[in-house]
Amino acid sequence: MEGGFWQSGQGVVAYAFPTYDGTGIKRDPPSAELERIASTAQRAQDSASLISDVRPGLREAVVFAACPVEGESTGLIAWTLKRVPVIGAEILNQLIVALGLLLGLVIVSGVWLGWTLTRWRRQSAQLSEQLAQAERLATLGRVSAGLAHEIRNPLGTMRMKAENALAAPADVREARVAGALESVLSQTARLEALVSSLLALTQPFRVERKALHLGEWLDEREQAHAETAARNGVHIELNIDPDTAARAAVLDPVQMARALDNLLLNALAHTGRGGVIELGARRRQNGALLLWVADDGAGIPAELRDSIFEPFTTARPGGTGLGLTLAREIVQAHGGQIALTERPQGACFEMELPWHAS
């Protein structure tokens, strides 16, 4: 216990440390505590009452107390301070050792965990590369098989026609040769379309956006297929939201026309005489532009729904199975997505594109 008297303007005017266990008599107040002694005494003088304060510490806490001296008009303030051990030295040393061991364990664990994660990351990268390579090989196998099938059929047709023409009697050979040549030209056109679609898929899409009037542009796409639709006895119906039709959007008119044409050609191939194909457009609540082509034909077989956008997947004879794949690539190049949606009859393909106003 230490204590003494304090006076404003003079500081500590008296000091005693009766429990001092050192040699001699301690006459100087603790310099490290003078500021706290002065502030506590000043507060006691201002409030004319007992004031206490505590300075916490790791090893010990220092408790200060100060109060005015009664019966004195000189402004003397009596003060005391007491040091109270918080943790014993032995316990503190043990705690420091324990914390050191814990810190060392954390560091070692961190190093081991980092090494383990690095090894796992390396193994994961190798596994991902192997899986990617296996997927590429599997895709190449599927594409090669589909391509071989698509090429073999026209070649087989041309060979059969040519053999029949050569084996025909002389009196009908000329007619057979003419028919064979027409078949060769037809199958050659089919192969050219196949090669063009494959080249379009292998080359990166460069989206060149332009401002266009949606209503007029969709009307042009409908008119481009009007003759085929009339020949098949099918009606193409435009269903465009009036507000959307009046707006000008920014997209690649050539690429998106290819995507829409592929969807319309598929719909025409699957819609019977007297059927209706709907070509529509509207703005969604999220601001995206929604384009769709729907028909009331036979629809997509259930076994093809999950792979309908994969190359060489087709539900119609003579189809290359690349039209929907090409449409998907074009839509994705625009930052959008295409999906086959459920409907009671027929098929409906929806293309959702980010809206870029002009």
Image (tube, rainbow, N blue to C red):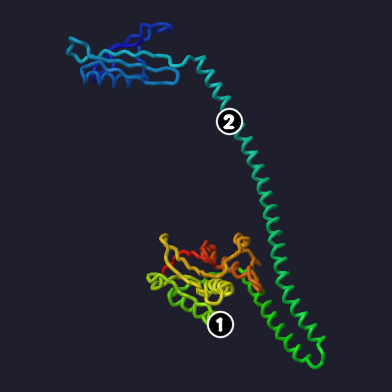
**Residue located 60% across and 67% down the image:** 325
Q: Estimate the x, y position of residue 148 in percent, counting from the top left.
A: 73, 69
In the image, residue 247 above or below residue 93: below
Reading the image, the residue beneath label 2 is 106
Q: Estimate the x, y position of residue 246 in percent, counting from the top left.
A: 38, 73
Q: Estimate the x, y position of residue 290 in percent, counting from the top left.
A: 46, 66
Q: Is residue 327 left or right of residue 285?
A: right
**Residue located 22% across and 18% down the image:** 45
Q: Is residue 34 left or right of residue 259?
A: left
- Amino acid type of the residue that numbered disc 2 sits on in the rendered structure: Val
- Amino acid type of the residue that numbered disc 1 sits on in the rendered structure: Arg
Q: Is residue 182 left or right of residue 25?
A: right
Please state which of residues 30 and 280 is positioned toward the viewer in this rendering. Answer: 280
**Alpha carbon separation for disc pair 2 and 1:** 79 Å
Q: Residues within 10 Å of mark 1 (few under 14, many from 20)?
A: few
Reading the image, the residue beneath label 1 is 231
Image quarter for residue 289? bottom left
Q: Residues within 10 Å of mark 2 (few under 14, many from 20)?
A: few
Q: Estimate the x, y position of residue 154 in percent, counting from the top left.
A: 72, 76
Q: Considering the numbered disc 1 on the image, is that residue within a helix, a strand or a loop?
A: helix
Please state which of residues 182 and 87 is positioned toward the viewer in this rendering. Answer: 182
**Residue located 30% across and 11% down the image:** 4
Q: Nearer the viewer, mark 2 or mark 1?
A: 1
